[in-house]
Image (spheres, grey):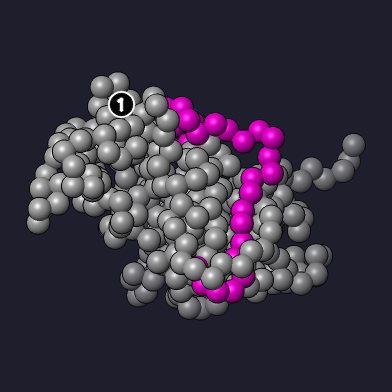
């Protein structure tokens, strides 16, 4: 009674507002710094700032939504923002700082429930005086003579990746590390192919196991060891199951892949060649369209051509990933990870 009713604001609402500033408006201004924003963009931005000025936030909301980081970027003048929004952003940041303290030190909440690294643990350090195999690197071990690390998923509700389908994830959904996709049941926790006698469920594409045309077609080849048997490789034998069952394969592309569909990483990310530091994103429903044997320089190889289902969502939105807050998460993770080496 008589108390002022404040506008309800949620972390998710502010997250979408931060995305509008960082992922939509900022690239527009960067591409045409002398151009004026369209009237509908100006109206949306004014609505965003009015919301921020009329509702309280907490430190936890700022950490989740990255709206504070978005306002700092408006004020940075690296991009030519209209002066109206620079002034409003500076004022709002001053208000939040007065109420909450220094908000420049807020960091992503990676290990809390819902965070990108929730349930992922480094279990032990090991000495590895050798070059590691691809499967070991996917698990989180690094080449070299110094310390390497082993990852584990400490969650009782980890999903089983050995089933067909999308598992509730959309094209373009993104993880910091392949082990995080394993936690969510997208891939298994060993090797680049998740399969059993029912067929192949998922593949992590690398430049060593696939040629990605970037046009919805993937060519996979395996050396048959010089023999004539198509079943010399366990992986190829399992893909044959997909040929007869017509089941589709989930595909994860990483920053290590030589493809225009590979995720783009920034300078803060560890070397692209290390699959353990790759940024996998998921694509669904690839069918085996063709398969056969080919001979090259007296070497017999078995090939499979996987084609993307035409009913899949367009990949244009997926190629905009990772979003700004996803880059924040990855850069923060790799910054603290490099400090533990």
> Residue 111, image x and y in percent?
69, 53
Please tell me how many numbered marks the rendered image carries: 1
The N terminus sits in image quarter:
top right
> Residue 95, image x and y in percent?
75, 67
Q: Quadrant of residue 33?
A: bottom left
Q: Please give the residue where the numbered disc 1 appears in the rendered image.
A: 241
- Taking the image as drawn, is residue 332 in sight? no
- Taking the image as drawn, is residue 167 in sight? yes
The stretch in magenta equals: 143-172
Q: Residue at x 67, y 57 (%)?
A: 122
> Residue 214, image x and y in percent?
24, 51
Left-right relation of 10 to 43: right
The secondary element bearing badge 1 is classed as helix
Q: Residue furthest right?
A: 1
> Residue 49, image x and y in percent?
60, 58
Q: Residue furthest front?
A: 227
Q: Residue at x 64, y 45 (%)?
A: 153
34 is within the stretch colored magenta = no
Q: Quadrant of residue 113?
A: top right
Crowding around mark 1 (Cα neighbors within 10 Å: few <14, some 14 to 19, many 20+) is some
Q: Residue furthest bottom?
A: 77
Q: Is residue 252 above or below residue 307?
A: below
Q: Residue at x 47, y 40 (%)?
A: 187
As rendered, which of 302 and 286 lies closer to the eye?
302
147 is within the stretch colored magenta = yes
Q: Is residue 12 above or below residue 335?
A: above
Q: Is residue 300 above or below residue 162?
A: below
The C terminus sits in image quarter:
bottom right
């Amino acid at each position: 009674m008589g108390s002022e009713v404040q506008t309800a604001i949620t972390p998710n609402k502010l997250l979408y507002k931060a995305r509008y500033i960082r992922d939509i408006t900022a690239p527009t201004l960067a591409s045409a710094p002398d151009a004026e924003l369209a009237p509908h963009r100006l109206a949306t931005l004014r609505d965003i700032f009015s919301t921020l000025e009329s509702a309280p936030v907490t430190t936890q909301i700022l950490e989740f939504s990255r709206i504070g980081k978005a306002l700092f970027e408006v004020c940075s003048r690296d991009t030519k923002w209209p002066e109206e929004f620079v002034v409003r952003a500076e004022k709002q940041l001053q208000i939040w700082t007065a109420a909450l303290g220094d908000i420049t030190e807020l960091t992503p909440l990676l290990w809390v429930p819902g965070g990108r690294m929730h349930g992922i643990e480094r279990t032990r350090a090991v000495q590895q005086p050798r070059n590691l195999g691809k499967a070991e690197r996917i698990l989180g071990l690094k080449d070299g003579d110094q310390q390497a690390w082993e990852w584990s998923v400490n969650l009782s509700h980890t999903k089983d990746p050995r089933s067909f389908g999308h598992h509730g994830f959309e094209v373009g959904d993104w993880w910091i590390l392949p082990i995080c996709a394993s936690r969510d049941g997208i891939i298994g926790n060993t090797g680049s192919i998740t399969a059993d006698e029912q067929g192949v469920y998922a593949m992590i594409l690398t430049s060593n196991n696939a040629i990605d045309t970037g046009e919805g077609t993937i060519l996979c080849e395996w050396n048959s060891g010089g023999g004539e048997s198509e079943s010399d490789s366990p992986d190829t034998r399992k893909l044959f199951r997909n040929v007869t069952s017509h089941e589709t394969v989930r595909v994860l592309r990483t920053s290590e892949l030589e493809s225009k569909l590979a995720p783009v990483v920034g300078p803060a990310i560890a070397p692209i060649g290390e699959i353990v530091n790759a940024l996998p994103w998921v694509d669904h429903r690839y069918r085996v369209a063709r398969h056969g044997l080919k001979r090259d320089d007296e070497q017999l190889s078995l090939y499979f051509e996987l084609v993307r289902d035409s009913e899949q969502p367009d990949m244009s939105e997926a190629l905009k990933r990772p979003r700004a807050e996803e880059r924040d998460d990855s850069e923060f993770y790799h910054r603290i990870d490099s400090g533990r080496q």
